[in-house]
Amino acid sequence: KNKEDFNLRTSESLIKENFEAEFSAFVQKEIVLIVKQNDTFTKLIKPYVKNNRIRQQIINSINKEFDLKKLNVGQKILLYVFNLDDKNEISKIIIPLNFNTDLVVEKNNHDSNYYVNKINLPITTDLVAQKYSISNSLFEDGRKANVPLTILAEAIRLYSFDIDFQRDIRKGNKLEIMYKV
């Protein structure tokens, strides 16, 4: 029985290895590049796009929508790569331009050209409600309750017209605050 289990496990391993080797070209990998001092876009993608013509086509497509000289140090660039015949083929590049806009470069499989689109990302906000008791001060107890500094400062500023923080607030008073994140 042990020999049969071993043979079964061995054949399963071989099947899995052959499957992975056969279909690795269909598995897309995400590669995150971070722009460093003195990096150029060409330098960043060169290890993944060996063909000069294709690399230049990608760069020209992007430069129509965004000046690649304006990449910032620390900026992320996402590459989506297939490995075909030991050659990397980029299927998509995403360059976040700001908090709500991405530049997306995608390869069209019909004509093998790369096309660029600016995508506006939906902005979502969540409402957060926090309630806490005041034992020391509105500010100190708010910090202990993990209320963001900007929210605390704004709440104190808003209430400062109506409340004397020295005389009106007592130990045990409760504050409930709702804000967007």
Image (cartoon, rainbow, N blue to C red):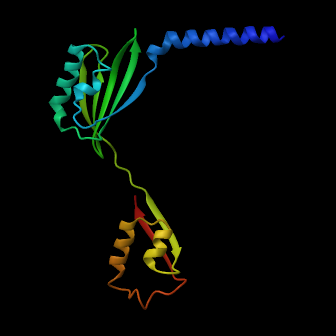
Vertical arrangement, residue 66 with respect to residue 146, above or below? above
Q: In this view, does 113 lie to the left or right of 22?
A: left
- The reply to whether residue 176 is in sight is no
Q: How many labels does the image show?
A: 0
Q: Residue furthest right?
A: 1
Q: Is residue 2 left or right of residue 24?
A: right
The image quadrant that residue 19 belongs to is: top right
Q: Nearer the viewer, residue 73 or 78?
A: 73
Query: Which residue is pictured at 23% across the width and 19% down the height?
Result: 55
Query: Which residue is pictured at 34% across the width and 17% down the height?
Result: 89
- The reply to whether residue 9 is in sight is yes
Vertical arrangement, residue 50 with respect to residue 146, above or below? above
The image quadrant that residue 47 belongs to is: top left
Q: Which of 9 and 101 is in front in this view?
A: 9
Which quadrant does the C terminus fall into? bottom left
Query: Which residue is pictured at 50% across the width and 69% down the height?
Result: 144
Q: Position of residue 80 (x, y in %)?
A: 37, 25
Q: Where is residue 98 in the image (x, y as percent from the top left)?
A: 27, 44
Q: Where is residue 84 in the image (x, y as percent from the top left)?
A: 39, 11
